[in-house]
Image (spheres, rainbow, N blue to C red):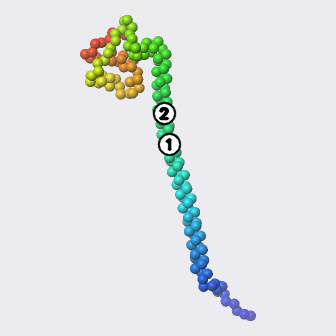
Amino acid sequence: MTTHSTGRRSRPSGARPRILRMRTLWFALAGLAVVVMLRRGTQTVTEGYQTASAVLRLEEELAELQQEHDELQWRLQFLRTPEGKRLEAARQLVLVRPDEHLLAPPHDDEAREAMSALGGDPSRARQPAEIVKRWARSPGTRPQAAEEP
């Protein structure tokens, strides 16, 4: 019987560095694949956040536009009433009934203060009839309008 060595097979001397280079290449390729996947994942997350931000901005704009639409619908309903037509005609054409008095607010600091005291809400500024009624009822040195029945 011949005795065989129980050790490893002998490899050529240049085989070990070649195996190390192959392993290094495979690890480099695997690392590159992981980096590419992470990059795409972060791009997807970033795009998701940008989309969510845009949606929130558009929802806020929609809410503002719906509020403006509701105010305009209310004003349109009011203008369809006889009182609304009368007040709009009085505002645009400076028309008054025979038993009414036209109040022309002075254009000075006192008038601006009185108008700003009525409220800073911009929707109020779009309702001239309400402003005129409040101004007519407000106490001060200005001539008072006749009380409404």
**Residue 63 — which label?**
2
What amino acid type is highlighted by mark number 2? Ala
Q: Is residue 116 visible?
A: yes
Q: Is residue 78 left or right of residue 19?
A: left
Q: Residue furthest left?
A: 141
Residue drawn at x 58%, y 66% is 30
Q: Which of the 4 quarters of the picture holds residue 27?
A: bottom right
Residue labelled with disc 1: 54
User: How many angstroms separate mark 2 from mark 1 (CA)?
Assistant: 14 Å
Give the SS element for disc 1.
helix
Residue 107 vertical placement versus 147 (above, below):
below
Q: In the visual, does 8 lie left or right of 145? A: right
Q: Quadrant of the N terminus?
A: bottom right
Find residue 23 and report its horizontal and vertical position in percent.
Answer: 59, 73
Residue 17 falls in image quadrant: bottom right
Residue 39 on image: x %, y %: 53, 57
Secondary structure of residue under mark 2: helix
Residue 140: percent from the left, percent from the top? Answer: 26, 17
Q: Earlier in the sequence, mark 2 or mark 1?
A: 1
Outermost residue on the right side: it is 1
Where 47 sits versus 13, above or below?
above
